[in-house]
Structures are given as C-alpha cells and as structure tokens.
Amino acid sequence: MGAILILIAGWIVAGWSSKRVYKLANASEKIDKTLPPIFRKIVKISIMIITFLAVLGNFGVETTSIIAVLGAATLAIGLALQGTLSNVASGVMLLIFRPFSVDDFINVGTISGTVTEIGIFTTTFKTPDGLAIIAPNSKVWGNEITNYSTNDIRRLDLPFGIGYSDDMDKAIEVVSTLITNDGRVLKDPELMVVVNELADSSVNLLARPWCHRSDYWQLKWDMTKRIKEVLDENNISIPFPQRDVHLFQENQKN
C-alpha cells in the first residue's frame, strides 16, 4: 500500500513540477522557446526515477547497487555518445545565451551565412550564394562568433589610391563632399577621410562613413563607383602598380 501511495505521489509531483517549470521557462523572455519542453521532460523523468527508487526501497530492495548500475550505465552511454551530448550541451548554451538568433547574418569558423534554424544538435545556415550549411552545435559554440546583425549601424571602409603628383587635400575634399551628401550616411559617428598609406605606386586614402546595417552593401557598392567617377571628374588619377626599368648599354671591347 505504501509503495502505491509513493508511486501516486511521485506521479502527481512529477506532473505538477514539470508543468510549473514549463510555465515559468516559457514566460521568460530570456529563454528560447525551444528549451521549455526539454526542461519539462528532464524534471518529469528525474522525479519519476527518484520515485521508482523509493518504491523499490519500500519493497526492501537494496537501491544502492541499482544506483551504482545506473551510474555506470550513464557513464558508458555518455562516453559512447560523447559527440552527440556535446552537440546537445552546445545547443542548450546557444539557446540560453543567444549569441545570435534566427535571421542573423554571422560568421563562425569558415561559415558565413544567415541563420535559418537553431536546433538542439545542429545549426542551419543559408549562405549568400544560396547554399544550406548544417553545422554541429559543438563546432558553432566552440568557435569565435561574429554577428553582423547585432548592431543597427556599421562602418564602411572605402580605400582608394591617388597618384603622388595629385593634390591630397583636394581628393579628401571631393570624396568627403560626395559621401556626406548621400542621405544614407549618418552624421554621427562623423565621417573620416584620411591618408592611410604611402604605397609603392600610390598614396592610399581611406574613407570611413557610418550607415544603417540595411544600407551597408548597397552604399558600399554605390560609393565605390562614385568615388572613381568623382576623382575622374576632378582630374585626380587612380594609379595602377608600375615599375620603372632602366637599361644600361655597356661598351664591348674587341
């Protein structure tokens, strides 16, 4: 009779506790919606295992040996499924800490793409050229993650070169005016156009405007084209690598 009461009580507690955990986890904005069902199952199974051991103890069964066997079995299963469990643990970490979300464009390891799905075992990406890449979560969590979608504004780096005989101040002025007049360029942070390098064949300048993330690529492509055009309009050359070769003729003695 006592064993039946323990079993009933354990079943009730397991059901109530698992539902309570699910409700609390599901109500939290910090916990991904994939996790509450997993938490509910873990709580319910754990309580039922404890209940089962309590029932066996009520019947006079030595539970110490059973616990030892379960521990050994758990260890063996853990070693056999080490890679899989690592992916599960990494998936849970990704869902809890959220270094990225679905629809974010990220770079992780050698993968660059938009996140389309975050699962317990794998994360799925869609690359800019339309490929689907499925990566184990352990590889994702274990690598440095660059999230290009976290911040609303981004900085463009627009390098360009002019000839050594060209007017640097004029080049900076015309490019600054061009970029500043584009409505997609933000006033704050302020645009910066500087002389970046004295290279072998050119004076390399660098323009660094800021824009909203949604304008980044189109602005980059437009500015690359317009910088070339505005330099041409102002007779400022864009040199290409060149090398001077000097030939010397030696007088041959007969």
Image: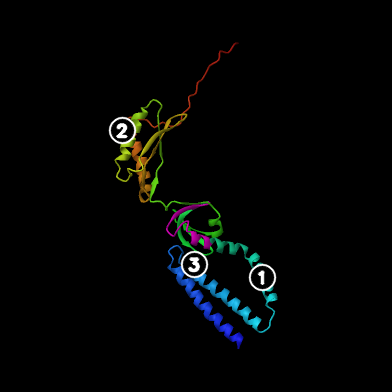
Per the image, label 3 sits on a secondary structure element best described as helix
Q: Nearer the viewer, residue 38 or 247?
A: 38
Give coordinates of residue 198: x percent, y percent: 45, 29
Q: Would you say residue 94 sits in the magenta stretch?
A: yes
Considering only order in the chain, which callout, 1 or 3, is on the residue closer to the N terminus? 3
- Name which residue type carries label 3: Leu
Q: Which residues are magenta?
A: 91-109
148 versus 236 height, above or below = below
Instruction: Report, in whole angstroms, how far the alpha carbon at label 3 lies from the one at label 1.
Output: 25 Å
Of the 4 image quadrants, the one containing the C terminus is top right
Per the image, label 1 sits on a secondary structure element best described as helix
Of the 4 image quadrants, the one containing the N terminus is bottom right
- Say which quarter of the image contains residue 176: top left
87 versus 56 height, above or below = above
Instruction: Report, in whole angstroms, how far the alpha carbon at label 2 lies from the one at label 1.
Output: 78 Å
Residue beneath disc 2: 233
Residue beneath disc 3: 35
Q: Would you say residue 103 sits in the magenta stretch?
A: yes
- Label 3 vs label 2, nearer the camera: 3
Q: Is residue 67 left or right of residue 212?
A: right
Instruction: For the residues labelled 2 and 1, say whether their Cβ atoms are less than 8 Å apart.
Output: no
Label 1 Cα crowd, 10 Å radius (few <14 / some 14-19 / many 20+): few
- Name which residue type carries label 2: Glu
Give coordinates of residue 138: x percent, y percent: 56, 58
Residue beneath disc 1: 71
